[in-house]
């Protein structure tokens, strides 16, 4: 594809310090932090404001700490998001329950619907001065002297326009248009991927996170807004296609009962409030996430299997890492952003890939969860240190 040249100097482009493509968790958080630091930011998203998206919803402690630091956690609570005070691991018929201890100003964990958390982050970014254009998609990047210097955009009405920017950030997901346009290639990939089906249920009377395992299948229960529980069933991609594809409802119920009969009985008595949603799986990756005038954040730059429900936490933490680099300026800082992200995330990535293999018995998967817990403790310590060492948190 030929590079799109900027408009002539006689018709100067509207200019921003940063253009962010994508207004979900990663993009909205990045825009908010940039705007709080005084950057002039434009965010574009092809969807409408406030729409839902596929998500596990669960925030781990590192993500909740970020929302607390940014002054958004109280709004998450005010939206009716339940406080999660325990997480239970079900290994066959054995249950290991862990209490969530209040720490660093965080009284529990939270799993907001994306219609809640995405809106709160967008509203906070707008309050800080960021501009948003919805139903607007990236068509191409502007380049000058082999450097990205802006974007060509198109609205749902067919209006095409260009904007200049010192930095274009792709926060546009696994199939990132920005990544495609700059030729960002993966340099580390996983070996395994799971297929997932989930829906929302009322009248379950379930509190806390529940993660259930039997050989070949796992189930998660995540309390979220409006008194609902998101209940998902996860299996290998092969089993997903063989046992769920033809009849999603029957496959979901059968696998749910196989993994945890008691939970299957609860769901059978409950009321399903939304349609079943499925994700056939995607092998995880780390992509090259920076270059002259561009960067990637969130799933656009780094993606791992959703089985460990860590994607939203990743997005919030990596947003801050990228903004710290953007504030320093220069390509060396962007390179350091990628290195810092990889140092934080590689352990999480590797243990998640091992769990997603389903090549384990119950003793082995419990050991993998202990390794996962160790990695998450390191992650939480990093976020805590950002507050304690006086590093700017964007408020």
Image: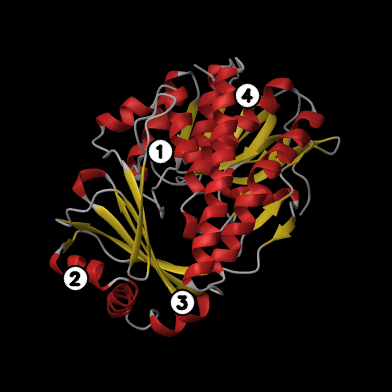
Q: Who comes first in sequence, dot 4 or dot 2?
A: 4
Q: Position of residue 174 (x, y in %)?
A: 58, 55
What whole-number distance in Å separates the C-alpha atoms at marks 4 and 2?
A: 55 Å
Find out whether the residues at labels 4 and 1 contact each other: C-beta distance under 8 Å: no
* Location of residue 343 with respect to 306 vertically, above or below: above
Q: Which structural element holds mark 1? A: helix
Task: Please state which of the two labelled residues, at mark 1 or mark 2, is closer to the viewer.
Answer: 2
Q: Residues within 10 Å of mark 2 (few under 14, many from 20)?
A: few
Question: In terms of depth relative to the viewer, which is nearer, 281 or 214?
Answer: 214
The first of marks 1 and 2 along the sequence is: 1
Q: Residue shown at 70%/44% (left/top)?
A: 342
Q: Which residue is mark 1?
A: 118
Please tell me which residue is depicted at 25% across the width and 29% down the height of the picture.
78
Q: Are marks 4 and 3 in contact (CB under 8 Å)?
A: no
Q: Which residue was labeled with disc 3?
A: 216
Question: What residue is pinned by disc 4?
Answer: 16
* Callout in the foreground (4, 3): 3
Cα distance, mark 4 to mark 3?
Answer: 50 Å
Report which residue position mark 2 lands on. 265
Residue 393, given in percent of the width and then of the height, sits at 54, 20
Q: Quadrant of residue 14?
A: top right
Q: Is the residue under label 2 in contact with that under label 4 (CB below 8 Å)?
A: no
Q: CA distance from mark 1 to mark 2?
A: 33 Å
Q: Which of the pair 195/204 is nearer the observer?
A: 204
Q: Look at the image and name its color scheme.
A: secondary structure
Residue 249 point in image, percent of width and height? 28, 75
Residue occupying the far right of the picture: 145
């Amino acid at each position: 594809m030929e590079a799109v040249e900027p408009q002539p100097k006689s018709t100067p482009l509207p200019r921003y310090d940063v253009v962010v493509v994508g207004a979900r968790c990663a993009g909205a958080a990045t825009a908010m932090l940039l705007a709080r630091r005084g950057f002039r930011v434009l965010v574009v998203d092809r969807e409408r404001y406030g729409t839902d998206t596929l998500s596990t919803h669960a925030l781990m402690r590192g993500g909740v700490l970020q929302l607390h630091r940014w002054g958004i956690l109280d709004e998450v609570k005010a939206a009716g998001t339940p406080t999660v005070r325990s997480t239970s691991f079900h290994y066959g018929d054995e249950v290991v329950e862990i209490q969530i201890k209040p720490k660093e100003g965080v009284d529990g964990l939270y799993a907001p619907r994306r219609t809640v958390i995405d809106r709160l982050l967008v509203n906070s970014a707008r309050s800080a001065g960021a501009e948003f254009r919805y139903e607007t998609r990236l068509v191409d990047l502007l380049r000058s002297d082999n450097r990205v210097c802006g974007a060509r955009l198109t609205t749902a009405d067919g209006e095409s326009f260009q904007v200049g920017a010192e930095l274009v950030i792709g926060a546009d997901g696994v199939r990132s248009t920005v990544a495609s346009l700059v030729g960002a290639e993966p340099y580390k990939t996983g070996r395994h991927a799971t297929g997932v089906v989930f829906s929302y249920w009322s009248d379950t009377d379930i509190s806390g996170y529940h993660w259930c395992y039997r050989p070949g299948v796992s189930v998660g229960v995540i309390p979220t807004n409006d008194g609902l529980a998101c209940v998902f069933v996860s299996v290998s991609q092969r089993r997903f296609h063989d046992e769920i594809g033809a009849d999603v409802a029957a496959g979901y119920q059968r696998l749910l009962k196989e993994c945890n009969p008691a939970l299957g009985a609860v769901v059978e008595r409950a009321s399903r409030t939304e349609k079943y949603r499925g994700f056939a799986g995607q092998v995880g990756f780390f992509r090259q996430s920076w270059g002259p005038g561009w960067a990637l954040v969130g799933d656009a730059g780094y993606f791992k299997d959703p089985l460990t429900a860590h994607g939203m936490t990743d997005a919030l933490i990596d947003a801050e890492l990228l903004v710290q680099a953007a504030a320093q300026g220069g390509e060396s800082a962007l390179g350091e952003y990628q290195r810092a992200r990889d140092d934080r995330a590689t352990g999480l990535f590797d243990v998640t890939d091992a769990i997603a293999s389903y090549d384990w018995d119950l003793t082995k998967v419990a050991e993998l969860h202990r390794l996962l817990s160790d990695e998450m403790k390191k992650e939480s310590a990093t976020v805590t240190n950002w507050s304690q060492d006086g590093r700017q948190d964007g408020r």
